[in-house]
Image (spheres, coloured by chain):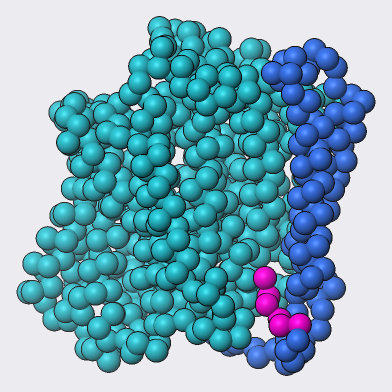
Chain colours: A blue, B cyan
Amino acid sequence: MSASNENGSRSGQRAGVFDVRQVIAALFVLYGLVCTLMGLFGTSSREIDQAAGVNINLWSGIGMLIFAGSFILWGWLRPIVVPTDSESESS
Amino acid sequence: MHVLAQEQLRLDAGPVDYLLLALYFAFVLGIGLLARRSVSSSLDFFLSGRSLPAWVTGLAFIAANLGAVEIIGMSANGAQYGMPTMHYFWVGAIPAMLFLGVVMMPFYYGSKVRSVPEFMLRRFGKAAHLVNAISFAVAQLLIAGVNLFLLASIVNVLLGWPLWVSVIIAALIVLSYTGLGGLSAAIYNEVLQFFVIVAALLPLTIVGMIKVGGWSGLVDKVSTQYGANELSAWPGNELTGFGSNFLSVLGIVFGLGFVLAFGYWTTNFVEVQRAMASKSMSAAQRTPIIGAFPKMLIPFLVIIPGMIAGASVQEMMVFKQTGEGNVEYNDALLLLMRDLLPNGILGIALAGLLASFMAGMAANLSSFNTVFTYDIWQAYVIRNRPDSYYLNMGRWVTVGSTVIAIGTAFIASGYSNLMDYLQQLFSLFNAPLFATFILGMFWKRMTPAAGWSGLVLGTAASLSVFLMAETGVLDLLGQGASFVGAGAAFVVDILVSVVVSLATRPKPAAELVGLVYGLTPKEERTASTTGEDSGWYRRPGLLAGIVLVIVIILNIVFG
């Protein structure tokens, strides 16, 4: 997102406060864990039959964990940079 | 409502599902609280301080539109009409979104207006401004009501609460985060919602496809039960209600693809506001173009499940073949969820549906309060107060509009096919707007008087088509009436604007710099290509070209 070239001049500092990517990742870590656990322990064979023989809880849980991981990685590789001298725009 | 409340639709939600749903609401409110910290002026509240990156505004751009109408309405259309519904995405959205990004955004973002009606004010003066601001505000309240109604019906199905309790609780949740964090809270939540919606619909589509035996299984089922018409997007006679193939294609391309879509995507402040909140001209231009990528693929998660429901869910098949039963097309997605999803993923599917409805309603509210506060209150009622007054005002407007949306939720319950209802609203308000905008942006001679008279008479034209279709004077089934109404509004608006312009005095050219194509220097309407806007993958024109190629391929493959 905010493409601060890592090799370029560091014109700001990492914003530790609010990065929506981390919020999204956090929700999906929780969702992924719950679904994976449900898929492993909480899905009856009747439910699997109902879902065309697919253990959809397990597969979507794994998928969500991978997605969350990629967002964490993205936020870690390209952190939000807040300009230190923020020009204030008056309307 | 009465339909959705029935026992056969009651989903078998367990404790895990409620846990997942509760987690989602905790995050939504958390984002509202976090976003509140960054709100210190009215510009922060109404336009996120113009500071957001393009991928955030791009996803919000799409999620704001991915409301109830899109999810429930489009899957209903998928169950009823099949593949021709794809036109709402590939013809009815993509070209207009690209046009907004490439051609129109430089004027919106470059002129630093805070809303679409404010652009009208600067280009055409007060009369056009008032007409636009008021018609937009009214439409938003009505549409917020539709979204709220659908949200409440889902809560009603899930928990079995009375409709009015669901309506009020749903409204309170949306109110609390939009009221706290303003547009930032709405936009960040829209991005979160986008991913939750995908997480809900993707597993449903995959399981559904496996259930019907893959793509070939779906093709077999649909063509043996309902005929092959539903499997190709063109010419879409069922959808338009026109008997002739030629008229049907013309109706889709001109009525839906050109007038309705361009009117909706390029002048609707709900959408444009998301782009205006981005941090640079380049990011603003990229907002709708980035949004176009997911927009191309959403039909596979919405229309295909609708078609699967139409071809495999028992009640739906009976209803479609005989027109009898206790279900209706709007129930397609819910029935499929009930049949296929186990506890766990079911909770995520429910969170996704609620997310979608809240996204739609929050978008309506956040754009409504900007227009009401800046364009009606600050411009005409109470002027020249300090900024904090308008910030505070915006919060109260959010409260007031939520209360009104609760009222309009009950108007919406009178229509069985919500898409018809909304298409009618859009064609009433948006089709003439696009004509006025496009003429005003490219023809400097167009006068203020032409601005408002074109709008008023154009709206009147689509209103009369709507009334003629309702009373049976015009015999049009399907969505054809909206397409014709939109076309009529466009033509009338252009004619009136040209005639009136030639008879009245234009604004002096100096006042139109930044607003009209021929009078704006090239550098002012060109995005920078340095710093955070560098790189080929950040060039709006190139990105738009890529989208266009993909959408043409999709039309050929599924045509």
Residue B288 vertical placement versus B43 (above, below): above
* Residue at image coords 78%, 34%: A59
The dominant secondary structure in magenta is loop
* Residue at image coords 58%, 19%: B213
Residue A91, picture quadrant: bottom right
Residue B496, picture quadrant: bottom left
Residue B259 showing in the rendered view: yes
* Residue at image coords 62%, 71%: B53
- Tell me the quadrant of the picture where the C terminus of chain B can be found: top left
- Tell me the quadrant of the picture where the N terminus of chain B can be found: top right
Which x, y percent locates residue B482? 28, 39
Residue B219 painted magenta: no
Q: Residue furthest right?
A: A41
Is residue B534 rendered to the left or right of residue B342? Answer: left
Which x, y percent locates residue B546? 45, 61
* Residue at image coords 65%, 55%: B191
- In the image, B358 versus B56, the foreground residue is B56
Task: Point out the stretch of residues depicted in magenta.
Answer: A1-6
- In the image, B124 versus B228, the foreground residue is B228
